[in-house]
Amino acid sequence: MSAIEIKENFYWTGLIDRDIKSVDLIFNPVNGVTYNSYLLKSPGANVLFDAPPFRCFDEFIGNINSVCAVTELKYVIITHVSPDNAASIEKITSLAPQAKLMASANALAFLKDFSGREFDCVSVADGQLLKLEGNKIKFLDVPFAGWPDTIFVHIDKINVLLSGLSFGAYFGGKAGDDGFQDAYREYFQKLLLTYKSYIRYALNRIKPFDINVICPLFGPVLDEDAQKYTGLYEEWSSAALKREKALAVIVYASAYGHTRELAGKITEGVKLETDAEIKTYDIMSSDPSQVLRDMEEADGILPGSPTVNGDALPEIMRLLMQMNSIAHGGKAAGAFGSYVWSGEAPDMLMSRLNMLKMDTVEPALKMKQQGPADFEQALDYGKRFGRKLNEVWKKRSRAVSGKTRWLCTVCGEVFDGALPPDKCPVCNAGKEAFVEYSQGMLTFRDNKKLKTVIIGSGAAAIAAAEAIRARNRRASIDIYTRENIMPYYRPLLTKGLAEKVNSAEYFIKPPHFFEEKKINIHAGSEVSSIDAADKKIVLSDGSSVEFDKLLITAGARCFIPPFQGALLPEVIALREQSDFDSLMKIISGGPKKAVIIGGGLLGLETAYSLFMMKHEVTVLEACPVILPRQLDKDGAAILEASIEENSNVILRKNIFVDEILGTDKVIGVKTRMNEIIPCDLVIISAGIRSNFELAKNAGLDVDRAVTVNEKMLTSHPDIYAAGDCASFNSRIDGVWETAIEQGKVAGANMTGDDVSYKNKIFGATFNAFGTGLFSIGELGTDEKAEYLNVSFKNDLKKIYRKFFFKKRILSGGILLGDLSTTASLLHGVVNGFDVEKAEDCKLL
């Protein structure tokens, strides 16, 4: 079958596999399956959309060539990647090396995993436009509208929607043929029903478009009455009426009645803590399909089984095996059961619940059937489950938008995406530090004309701009920065030394974000002074800009100790993109001997990057241990052992630098002990100093930084400050996380809202040298206080955990080597968990 023209210059280049009898082991198509691909002919830019399985590649490439030569493709756009089509995508890109591959970040990650190689590709952002001559292609991020990597693509001129896994069917005929409606519904029920909230989000995203044709990955092109098929999805994905209280399902099997009695006592305990609706089922006399439906809607699930022959009863295990982490992940869960000789069943159930990423109450409850039963344990377990159910209900009762956002619990930055990032680009925390983010509803709006000006383009500036725009659609927002670059993640500078960082990861927002939000970025525009009386700023070229409200986010600079030789060109303090460029120019000339002054987090991260680039690195730390603010003596020893084992980086402690040697270039450093350490590169990581000079010269109050109150307001009623240049309660955090929070508060108050800033506790993270570290809070440093310390150490695996309880309240903790409890530790410190609560949250 050759290509078919669907609309003018838009072709179907797919094929029909008549021989296939089974798909994903759960579909049995009777007339084959249509695998779709499409091609848009546009002057100077032919675009291919999607690809079929590789077994059909020869027919597929013939269909492309019947429209245009494969070498004439300029773009290859993919709405979904699977093991089935990955090889076809890889082959197309090799036959058309001139074509730019475009897909979601998740799709590109999947493609790399499936193919085992890198691609010349572009990760598309939500709302991004690809402008062609005569056509505009818009990308819509619709995660879990089938799979985490799914995007929709809309072509405006011809009103075509490429819908990926949505609106499809495993069917080999036309939409009007007998059997299609059944196949269309079966496809939705088996593949998409679990993702119904995400489907509704996707449906809302396409409502503004007048779609004439829907082009799915599988099944017939829907080129007649497209609204009929979107309407069916609306009907099938409609959420159940919102419940007014939580729902819990307790389901059990009982051989002699003991597990049934446990279920009853657990139910009593749950009712003591919550007014939730509780549905209890004996699976041996209940309809499993009804139980599964209730479990899908429930906020908490408690399965129970006796132990029979060292195993859980299959009737209960079958229920759990039909659950999945998308539909049930995050729900409250627990497990219980009785036994005579051994009690493996509850643990087996709990293992499955943990695999489903449910919020479990551990350990599982298991009681021996011997003598009079003591049901106090069951009552207590029910109470603990009830408390957990209340917590989960508060989260789940908020409206589900279908757009997934992820909060890094370490630094507070929020990221869009179907899946959490593998690592936070801000603080380097791993995937385990992310939780799903639900933004609170804004109650303040004021669309009066307002001219806002922001000095600086870092975290505080962008957070403030977002806060302003969220509250005022008419306000003008102008950001002035002396750097000739769009706003970027400064913490990624060290990572970028040793590995390629793509633009989607490096820049805080994609360019179209600022265009859509009407936020004007004036790159390369340095502010030379502030005229507070006349409310205007003066730029270095002499021009001036008036403001109604001004925010100063001038940031900070690296502290350079007054060493002799500190101005030599090979002495670098890595703070800005220009510093990065200078450093890369120096090290590109071949292997260097580098000395890093400062063994803090940034110094060690830089050391690791340089080591990965095959440079010789020596770290000089003035303290007797590395990371003295993040580790105790035992933890520091384990980290030092990891550095020694996984690199040739030399760590020197109790070393004070006296001079940097060299006349025209660096040749070494001299210590206070008159030791000379030869080197040809020096990187200084010795803290920061706030940039408060603009504010001071404008007559604002300063004290090591710009003094602000809880509104982020300076001593001038219309000038605010936030981030590294601001001092709140005489405290300058100097971290990205604080800048974000202060920027949000400043931006809100600039519009007239009333929001206050409070100092927060943020953790520190480190991932390098084959290990990872998370540290937070007070680590037993109060000499007048008594601490209860709980620690665990495994020297072989280099795992170390230590928790500090001050007056039995969790004040801080260290995780080294195993960071799986990062979010729980942070939550515990921030909320002041006692020992018992820490045990409930699986910290101890």
Image (tube, rainbow, N blue to C red):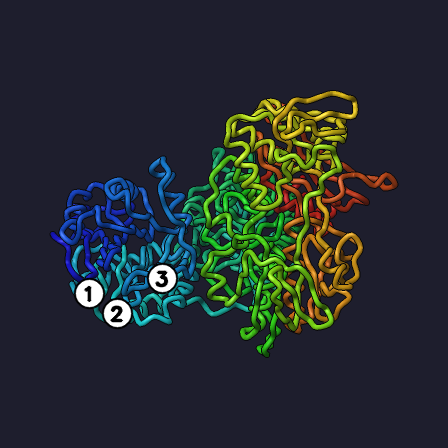
Residue drawn where x is 22% and y is 49% of the image: 72
Instruction: Give the residue furthest to the right.
Output: 784
Q: Quick one: label 1 or label 2, which is nearer the N terminus?
A: 1
Q: Taking 498 as reference, is 545 left or right?
A: right
Q: Which tag is nearer the camera, tag 3 or tag 2?
A: 3
Q: Taking 235 as reference, is 701 left or right?
A: right
The amino acid sitting under disc 1 is Lys
Look at the picture and state if 590 lies above or below 347. Answer: above
Label 1 close to label 3 by CB (< 8 Å): no
Residue drawn where x is 63% and y is 57% of the image: 460
In-front residue for pair 609/407? 609
The answer to whether residue 202 is seen in the rendering is yes
Instruction: Give the residue furthest to the bottom.
Output: 448
Q: Which tag is nearer the camera, tag 1 or tag 2?
A: 1
Residue drawn where x is 39% and y is 62% of the image: 199
How far apart marks 1 and 3 lie (CA) works out to 18 Å
Quarter of the C terminus within the rendering: top right
The amino acid sitting under disc 3 is Lys
Label 1 close to label 2 by CB (< 8 Å): yes
**Residue of label 2:** 212
**Residue of label 3:** 138
Q: Residue 745 appears in which quarter of the rendering?
A: bottom right
**Residue 625 percent coordinates (x, y):** 73, 29
Mark number, residue 7: 1
